[in-house]
Amino acid sequence: MKLTMQLGSRSYDIILKSGCLANLYQFANVANRKVFILTDSGVPEQYAQTVLAQCPNGMVYTVPQGEASKSLKVYGQVLQAMLEFNMTRKDLLVAVGGGVVGDLTGFAAATFLRGIRYIQIPTTLLAQIDSSVGGKTAINIPGGKNLVGAFKQPSLVICDPDTLKTLPAHILSDGIAEAIKYGMIRDPGLFALLDAHNSDNVLPQADEIIARCVTIKRDIVAKDEFDTGERMLLNFGHTLGHAIERHSEFAYTHGQAVAAGMCMLSARTAAPAVTARLIGCVSNY
Ligand code: NAD
Ligand code: GLY
């Protein structure tokens, strides 16, 4: 399946297909340019290696896993490594990982040499349904989360649901929290799908869940790229969530914290089953 984000000169395709990671070369010119592949130490190496195998002039750079890598320090190290790889504006950055790698890569792409192209290859459910699409990029500073960033759309999103097979259940659960968000803001039909599935048996439904969530996000972002109106719907639960993340020193993941934020905001109005599901995401079942 191919979805297109319609944003004029910043339009791009979102490819959603099992196995498409191995066919990146069919969708992007990775042969005639340097390709800097950014991943983290928790992402199974095979994914970045599959990308590298398609890039004659590629290199893999691995940052430590976890939110702490969305920092000024790691961002600076990434830029330095790109410089030492002699990257030019014709070259390409590729994010292989979850939202942490995606946000960091996007911000490096937005700022290196005043902006170069990048591709998102999300490997968590959360990144596949949310963070890889829409061009929000950011790092954290001691004063708060995502406070330094840029709107920088990727030039392509390659979403391969097969990569979810290696995800631990608690990280899948973080993605389910964001899927519940789409149910609450736009598509209550997602609840029936999610009701019947938890992190142990959701994978066969992943294609449908991703397609429905990404379609919603695509349609909202196409109307409000810079988050001044309708896009704010996508931030549902996030203000409280970001506070919880930061004040727990990131002991609570983004998915858990957003689930808690949505729960607090909707406790009086949401169906009890939805509230119970959100509480389940907070406690990572
Ligand atoms: P994450 O990127 O930290 O990934 C979670 C863990 O899963 C990491 O340890 C990672 O190494 C590991 N991992 C990744 N892929 C794997 C795989 N296929 N198999 C096994 N392990 C794997 O967390 P996340 O939930 O993907 O993303 C959260 C981040 O995304 C937060 O920083 C949040 O602020 C950001 N975010 C950004 C947007 C946006 O629009 N830019 C939207 C939502 C969230
Ligand atoms: N996750 C919020 C947004 O992309 O706008």
Image: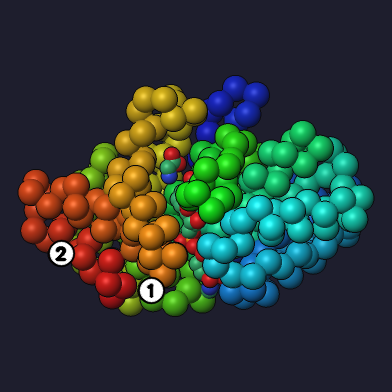
Q: Is residue 272 left or right of residue 45?
A: left
Q: Quadrant of the C terminus?
A: bottom left
Q: Is residue 68 left or right of residue 118?
A: left
- In percent of width and height, residue 195 lies at 20, 63
Q: Position of residue 15 (x, y in %)?
A: 56, 48
Q: Which residue is mark 2?
A: 276
Tag 1: amino acid? His
96 and 240: which is toward the camera: 240
Image vertical order of residue 113 relative to residue 82, above or below: above
Estimate how packed mark 1 is, as few (under 14), some (14 to 19) or many (20 or more) residues with alpha carbons within 10 Å. Answer: some
Which residue in the rendered view is the most extreme toward the top? 8
State the residue at coordinates (78%, 51%): 79
Q: Is residue 121 visible?
A: no
User: Which of the 4 image quadrants contains residue 150?
Assistant: top right
Picture coordinates of residue 108 (x, y %)?
70, 46
Mark 1: which secondary structure? helix
Q: Label 2: how many residues lie within 10 Å, few (<14), some (14-19) or many (20+)?
A: some
Taking the spot 59% from the left edge, 70% from the top edge, the residue there is 65
**Is residue 136 positioned above or below 199 on the image?**
above
Determine whether the residue tagged by mark 2 lies in a helix, strand or loop: helix
Q: Which residue is mark 1?
A: 170
Residue positioned 28% across, 58% down in the render: 259
Task: Tell me where residue 104 appears, x and y as whole percent.
Answer: 63, 52
Q: Is residue 111 left or right of residue 182?
A: right
Residue type, label 2: Ala
